[in-house]
Image (spheres, rainbow, N blue to C red):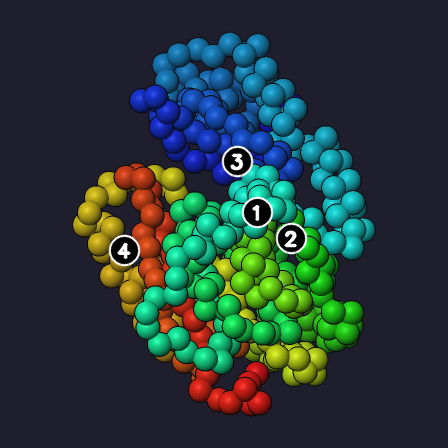
Amino acid sequence: MDYPKLRLIEMIPIRHESQELILIRDPEGIMEESLIVSRDVAYLFSLMNGQRSLRDIQAEYMRVFGELIYMDKLSELVSSLDEHLLLENERYSTRLNLLKTEYESADVRRPYLAGKSYPENRMELIVFLDEIFSQKVPDEEVPTHIKGILAPHIDYSRGREVYAKTYLHLKDVEPSLVVIFGTCHRASEKLWNISLKDFLTPLERIVISPDLKEIVKNNSVLKKYISEWPHRAEHSIELQLPLLQFMIQREFEILPILTGSMHEYIEGKKNLDDQEIEDLVSSLKECLSKYGKPYIVISAADLAHIGAQFGDYYPLDALTLSSSKVKDEMLLEAIKECEADRFFQLIREEGDKRRICGLASIYFQLRLLQGCQCKIIEYKQWTDGASSVSFAGAIFYSEKSREDRI
């Protein structure tokens, strides 16, 4: 407590009643509620790296703000962080180990966002989804033999239109298995995090076949990437499930895979022909072929994240948004052509400065769906004037006959 170390958290600038404040959010999901603090308090948080004593933090605050923060106030702040399990210490470790043990032993992943991002009551959720899909499919030729979709993972309120227009194309699709790549928003040691748990939603339980579980467990490569904990509080895959259930309206299985960071590849420390990538892709194809059931591949992925909320200091004016849109359109063109390497190289060329959080999920989807055709359904740039997130919907399809489908 004398040398407090703040664990990994998200600090998001917000405005409330003309005040500039900071929203504190825990990507790990240990602290379920969010906190709102002033900017000077957030600065104090940033100084807590485990190397500075409370006296050091007090002195640094005095140097920057020209005001003395009393030691009692500072100690009270540290105690509050400890109470909310935001410090890396024994109390946090004990709680984390308990939660991990409980989660690992459960045979089902319970909905984390029910009652937060969407209704937890079954009938209320059905009405909610019916409202989302109340619009009709656009009057255009709808490709048959759908092999997969690209969908956002932004919240329903902001991504509503793109979600609806994209998922409506699954209305007549009858896959036995849905392979879902989702972005892992917490630190992950692995490039893939495969879950073999059933997933529960307010609508019903979605299973992973015992046969598929055994195939994955017995695969010499994929068995090393079975990692359940990252799925506990992650929203990217969870947000797809009620939409899938509402649209398909028949039993289907899932194989959820959260993708970790590819920044070693962006920075040039690793190359795309790295053996790990090749082993992962070939092993998954081998497992799916061995399982033998028809499947589709979904990528739950947003595009650019720019502006104050994500640490950018430049103004988010019309020119900035327009420039980002042009770059997004280049990415969408690579997606349309199912060119995984070109999609990656475009992001690498700009150093991923726009934080394409769907980078890994989309890349691996394109690798699995190589040879398919793709149609971009919708593209949106959400902005509040200070920050922006862009996202798109797309469908992947094949002209092959139903008997020859994947």
Label 2, residues with CA under 10 Å away: few <14, some 14-19, many ≥20 = some
Residue pointed to by mark 3: 25
Kindly indicate whether the residue at mark 3 contacts the one at mark 1 (C-beta within 8 angstroms).
no
Q: Residue furthest left?
A: 319
Residue drawn where x is 73% and y is 73% of the image:
212
Residue pointed to by mark 4: 324
Residue pointed to by mark 1: 125
**Of 241 and 74, the residue lying toward us:** 241
- Res 339 → quadrant: bottom left
| Element type where label 3 sits in the image | strand
| Element type where label 1 sits in the image | helix
**Of 254 and 387, the residue lying toward us:** 254
User: Where residue 287 sits in the image (x, y, percent)?
Assistant: 68, 78
Marked residue nearer the N-terminal end (4 or 1): 1
Q: Is residue 2 left or right of residue 158?
A: right
Q: CA distance from mark 2 to mark 1?
A: 8 Å
Tell me if I can see residue 231 in this picture: yes
User: Where residue 6 sits in the image (x, y, percent)?
Assistant: 57, 33
Q: CA distance from mark 3 to mark 2?
A: 28 Å
For badge 3, the amino acid type reads: Arg
Marked residue nearer the N-terminal end (3 or 4): 3
Q: CA distance from mark 1 to mark 3?
A: 26 Å
Kindly indicate whether the residue at mark 4 contacts the one at mark 3 (C-beta within 8 angstroms).
no
Number of marks in the rendered image? 4
Q: CA distance from mark 4 to mark 1?
A: 35 Å
Single out the mark in the foreground, 3 or 2. 2
Single out the mark in the foreground, 4 or 1. 1
Label 3, residues with CA under 10 Å away: few <14, some 14-19, many ≥20 = some
For badge 2, the amino acid type reads: Leu
| Element type where label 4 sits in the image | helix
Residue pointed to by mark 2: 203
Label 1, residues with CA under 10 Å away: few <14, some 14-19, many ≥20 = many
